[in-house]
Image (spheres, grey):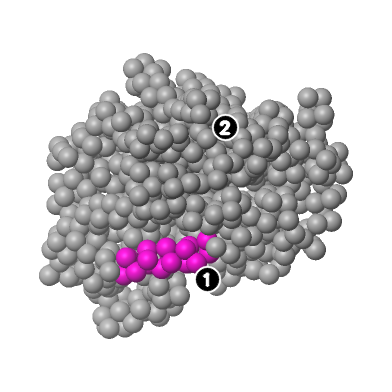
Amino acid sequence: MRKDLLTGLLAMVLATVALGLAYPLAITGISQVAFPGKSDGSLVSVDGQVVGSSLIGQSFSRPVLDKNGDPVLDEEGEEVLAPDKAYFQPRPSATGYSGNVTFFANQGPNSVEARETVRESLAAYVALEKPYDQSLTKDRVPVDAVTQSASGVDPHISEANARIQAHRIAAVRDLPLSQVEELISGHTDGRALGLFGEPGVNVLELNIALDKEAPIR
Amino acid sequence: MAQGWLQIAVFFAVLLALVKPVGIYLAGVLSNQRVFLTPIVGPIERLAYKALRVRPDEQGQDWKAYARSLIVFSLFSWVFLYAILRTQGVQPFNPGGFDSGPWDVSFNTASSFVTNTNWQYYGGETTLTYFAQMAGLAVQNFVSAAVGIAVLAALIRGIAARSAATLGNFWQDLVRILLYVLLPISILGALFLASQGVVQNLADSTVVHTLTGGTQILAQGPVASQEVIKELGTNGGGFFNVNSSYPFENSSGLTNFVEMLLILIIPAALTYTYGRMVGSQRQGWAIFGAMAALFVVAVAVVYFAEQHGTVAQHAAGLHTHAFDGSTGGNMEGKEQRFGIANSSLWTAVTTVTSCGAVNSAFESLTGLGGAVPFANLGFGEVIFGGVGTGLYSMLMYVILAVFIGGLMVGRTPEYLGKKIQAREIKLVTMAVLVTPLAVLLSAGLASATDAGKRSLYAGVNPQGFSETLYAYLSQANNNGSAFAGYTGFIQPNAPGNVGAYGITFADLLGGAVMVGARFLPIVLVLAVAGALAGKRVSPAGLGTMRTDNPTFVVLLVGIVILVGALTFFPALLLGPVVQSLTTRLF
């Protein structure tokens, strides 16, 4: 028994040093040298300013302003946000696209709350896109556009979702629709090795490309 | 759906192709033979024995000595981890400046990681230092996995032995499993993941200024090194709160594929290892066949269910059919890059094994889709199961099946030439029943008390019951996945631990359940191993019931389903079954 105690203690000390420090620090060192951009979060810059990560979705909304130019607040004192019509919009997020406080929306399959959330998202999506795409009806809305992602920061939207939004982008940015659609295909991540996963349009990269191709101001 | 089925088929084919080579390698490691890594790892292995003061070749242990070493080691594991979680304020690698959180949450977390459960009441990126993640949690990801495989190794030796007194040496098994299996695969896997965008650094969070003038804070950390062992050791505890759905843990369809393989490879290959070590490859394939059959059904049901969307979505007027450019289905709580197929496959993979890592939100699964994780856990994590634990639990069912089959044909039950007698059957029955008993008692207690209801997110309704039942099912089976609305930790000012407090009832009950349902069966399994080791092997005759043919596979599957269903069906009726049958909203 006494021998077990000594060996057990030594084993945990060794494991902590070897597996808990040496291993992760060595992996960090190698990764930092071998994959510098990837291991630091795949950050993307515009004009030398870091604007986000190509793997992490972000909000493309702006605060709603009242007549005096002050932000409108909701009942809880938070700024009311509205989608910026000049940008492709990401999937709904339960976390406000937080990159440091993540949680699931946890809406159950039979919950009233889930029905209300989807209903609101659906109405908002149609209200935003229909003026630019008259043929848009509820049954054409792709599911990803009105359901909350798991991570809260899904970097992708479906191709169908992007194609609907393209009408709005073309109108607001005064671009031919075909050019917007070309940009979409240029920023669609296909299945890995042509096989694994689902294709998705990277919203941040697409919006950066839009700004380059057709600056708003 | 065709493309989805193709992906699932390819995944299964790759897994199947790996079973034999990995199984042979694992057999070499567990039989203390020379393997291809011996020239590199051998010197380190000898150094480790020297440092630990063990002479494994001279110190074979009987089952009691083996169990004692294992318990002592796990006790130190718990104390180390708890101490690390309680001293966060003075630790290096703490750019976020985190203090220790509530003690009851630490109790739960320590119990969770030492038992290979990785149930998470805490949120990784909002409460833990990088030091605690690396030197605390990730170390347990390695060693708790090794403990599970060690128990299996001892059981296999007990079954294969001919009138032996010893089951091997625990310290030797621990060292060899870590050095020859878990660490080398983790090093390769971590570097692969880092090359695909899974972050690996020690930097503070990055503040970025978004295109529309906002700011976004991106949590960083040594993720890749932890992600790989979290999958490989079927641990499942995410660096981030949303686990493998977060792009910094699982960045693409490719990383997703590799991570799923990492989860299943050891549990699946161990069936081959088993056949090899008991001297009959067919025995291993028979068990693999039983597991694979249940696994394929699980995947098919989740995929089918998730592709149909939920009652709430249909009530809101959403059309969940697939069309060109859209996956359709229930995308609530799922990521676009994984879609329905890979979220469904992952859900099955992580719950047939005791991994518990998730790439989608279980609480948002459809009623029927959510019933599959319930069923997989209800069967006692024997469909591949956790590393080591899955197969040793399945072998308990095998012995039970041999016993029942023997009664049916009226012969003394024998398994691989060893008579199965009263003592073994008593031990096996206890080992099979400990976990279900822990689940039903704790879930009942939590459902019936106000203290338990404080953890509910969905409220007192079928969804709330599902949350509760799943919480204890997951903790008792050492899985760790969750219907994540259920909580034992309130963190009003996230991130950081300021003002955070635990729900003591849920934290302590869960912690106790995890520890009890892990170590009681382990001791019982080792006792079975000890009982079998000493038996003589009688040659198989004409009347011997075969345990390596399809008939036995069907019997085995039947018994697994029967025990699981009889135990949990009444409880499941109140949660997932109601939810999948009704169109009512709660």
Which quadrant holds the C terminus of chain A? bottom left
Residue that sits furthest to the front in the current view:
B542
Picture coordinates of residue B271, whole percent (x, y): 52, 52
Main structural element of the magenta stretch: helix, strand or loop? helix
Q: Is residue A129 above or below residue A174?
A: above
Picture coordinates of residue B465, whole percent (x, y): 30, 29
Left or right: B511, with B183 as reference point: left
**Chain letter of disc 1?**
A
Q: Secondary structure at mark 1?
A: strand
Q: Is residue B67 above or below residue A119?
A: above
Residue nearest the viewer, comparing B138 with A167? B138
Picture coordinates of residue B129, whole percent (x, y): 65, 41
Q: Residue at x 32, y 44 (%)?
A: B372
The residue mark sitting in front, 1 or 2, is 2
Q: Residue at x 18, y 45 (%)?
A: B311
What distance separates the C-alpha of mark 1 from that of mark 2? 65 Å
Q: Is residue B541 magenta?
A: no
Reading the image, the residue beneath label 2 is B528
Picture coordinates of residue A9, whole percent (x, y): 78, 33
Q: Residue at x 42, y 63 (%)?
A: B12
Left or right: B70, with A57 as reference point: right
**Chain letter of disc 2?**
B
CB atoms of marks 1 and 2 within 8 Å: no
Mark 1 crowd level (few <14, some 14–19, many ≥20, 10 Å Cα) = few
Q: Specify whether residue B494 is in view.
A: no
Which residues, given as a range, are shown in magenta? Answer: B3-19
Q: Specify whether residue B257 is in view.
A: yes
Q: Residue at x 17, y 65 (%)?
A: A140
Reading the image, the residue beneath label 1 is A46
